[in-house]
Image (tube, rainbow, N blue to C red):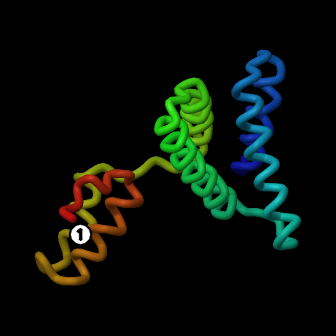
């Protein structure tokens, strides 16, 4: 089952269960996927769907930040819920131990190690581990 099929099935299940918020988030995701297919005249594979989801997650993070600055917690909570729905379709990130095991072949403090640490820490969602 492709990621797109899973999203469609989850949308149908949300309709049946009358989960309006989840349904709205999934419809936004499907609309973004369809828009990219139309714009680029392609059919999205799973990797392209993940990139659409990552883009939507970034938009949600930015929106949450703006809503919290404007003291609109109701809107920020809505965006957080949409992020939690989208998060379910992203591949699991790497733990710190997995990152360290992948980087064990590099000499410590080499430029390659630093770039690799930054890449894997960002992919794993633990960029806070980096010393900037």
Q: Residue at x 57, y 44 (%)?
A: 63
The spot of residue 37 in percent (x, y) is 83, 64
Q: Residue furthest bottom?
A: 111
Q: Residue furthest left?
A: 108
Left or right: 41 as drawn, with respect to 67 = right
The image shows a total of numbered marks equal to 1
Left or right: 132 as drawn, with respect to 127 = left
Residue 117 picture quarter: bottom left
Q: Residue furthest front?
A: 70
Image vertical order of residue 112 relative to residue 84, above or below: below
Residue 74 picture quarter: top right
Left or right: 3 as drawn, with respect to 5 = left
Q: Residue at x 74, y 38 (%)?
A: 26
The spot of residue 87 in percent (x, y) is 55, 41
Q: Residue at x 13, y 77 (%)?
A: 109
Image vertical order of residue 87 relative to residue 33, above or below: above
Towards the viewer: 9 or 75 = 75
Residue 49 picture quarter: bottom right
Towards the viewer: 48 or 122 = 122
Task: Give the secondary structure at mark 1.
Answer: helix
Task: Report which residue position mark 1 lands on.
Answer: 103
The spot of residue 113 in percent (x, y) is 22, 76
Q: Residues within 10 Å of mark 1 (few under 14, many from 20)?
A: some
Q: Residue at x 76, y 29 (%)?
A: 23
Image vertical order of residue 116 relative to residue 82, above or below: below
State the quadrant of the C terminus: bottom left
Towards the viewer: 48 or 73 = 73
């Amino acid at each position: 089952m492709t990621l797109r099929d899973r999203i469609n099935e989850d949308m149908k299940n949300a309709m049946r269960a009358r989960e309006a918020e989840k349904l709205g988030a999934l419809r936004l995701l499907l609309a973004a996927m369809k828009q990219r297919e139309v714009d680029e005249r392609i059919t999205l594979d799973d990797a392209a769907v993940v990139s659409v989801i990552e883009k939507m997650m970034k938009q949600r993070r930015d929106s949450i930040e703006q809503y919290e600055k404007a003291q609109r917690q109701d809107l920020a909570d809505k965006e957080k819920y949409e992020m939690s729905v989208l998060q379910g379709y992203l591949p699991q990130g790497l733990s710190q131990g997995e990152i360290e095991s992948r980087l064990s072949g590099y000499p410590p403090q080499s430029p390659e190690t630093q770039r690799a640490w930054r890449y894997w820490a960002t992919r794993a969602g633990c960029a806070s581990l980096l010393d900037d």
